[in-house]
Image: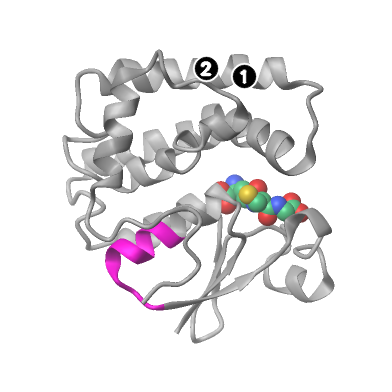
Amino acid sequence: MLVLHDNLGSGNAYKVRLLLSHLGRPFRRIEYDVTKGETRTPEFLALNPDGRIPLLQFSDGRTLAQSNAILFYLAQGTDYLPGDSFAQAKVLQWMFFEQYSHEPFIAVARYWLHFLDQREGLEEKWRRGYQALDVMETHLCAAAFLVGGTYSIADIALYAYTHVAHEAEMDLAPYPGIRRWLDRVAEQPGHALITQEEFS
Ligand SMILES: N[C@@H](CCC(=O)N[C@@H](CS)C(=O)NCC(=O)O)C(=O)O
């Protein structure tokens, strides 16, 4: 069985739980408290030298790190990744955007506020986070999903931290396109909440 080295508060790990839930693939979760350095032990570093979750472990012992690489692997041959090579590249375009222009600001602001009670430096995180939301809004005002009008791992990657942006004290009220898209994502079959611990 697949093992997901996980943390329930993590949006990056939630991306993997959400796709596994859509796919109906059974998996076992191992929870780590990232605020206590539990991913920095010698045992965990032997699995992932980068010391971070999510980490997916296969029954033959192989491991895969980086949330979006895990999504890309699991989605191969499923409805969550288009077959056309240009559409696949558009999916990757949004996933790289998520890691470079969205997650470092919105996820970090959320982590500081929600888990560390740290406010210093927030203004810059918010400024850059709102820039990322502006980019998404421009696209989602005119499109149901991020790539080709169908739900894909690009949507999963960006949903993870956008839907909890309020926990970063960010306001989605000026973003009607994003809010309608969040609703559409939450209506997909097999949707799971970020707080969901048990999967059948
Ligand atoms: N780019 C990585 C980021 C992973 C990451 O930052 N994980 C955090 C939790 S969201 C973590 O494990 N932090 C623990 C640490 O750095 O010690 C991904 O997308 O998987």
49 magenta-colored: no
Q: Is the CB atom of the residue marked by disc 2 within 8 angstroms of ligand 1's nearest atom?
A: no
**Residue 90 seen from this side:** no
In the image, residue 150 sits, relative to residue 75, either above or below, namely: above
Reading the image, the residue beneath label 2 is 130
- Residue at x-position 78% and y-position 40%: 116
Secondary structure under the numbered disc 2 in the rendered image: helix
User: Which one is in front, 140 or 81?
Assistant: 140
Q: Is residue 20 magenta?
A: yes
Marks 2 and 1 in Cβ contact (< 8 Å)? yes
Q: Main secondary structure of the magenta part?
A: helix
The crowding category of the residue bearing disc 2, from other C-alpha atoms within 10 Å (few below 14, some 14 to 19, many at least 20), is: some
Indicate the quadrant where residue 61 lies: bottom right
Q: How far across and how far down the image is residue 78, in percent? A: 22, 61
What amino acid does circle 1 point to? Answer: Trp
Residue span colored magenta: 17-26
| Residue shown at 51% from the left, 56% from the top | 195
Q: Quadrant of residue 23?
A: bottom left
Q: Is residue 170 above or below residue 53?
A: above
Q: Is residue 175 above or below residue 50?
A: above
Amino acid type for the residue under numbered disc 2: Tyr
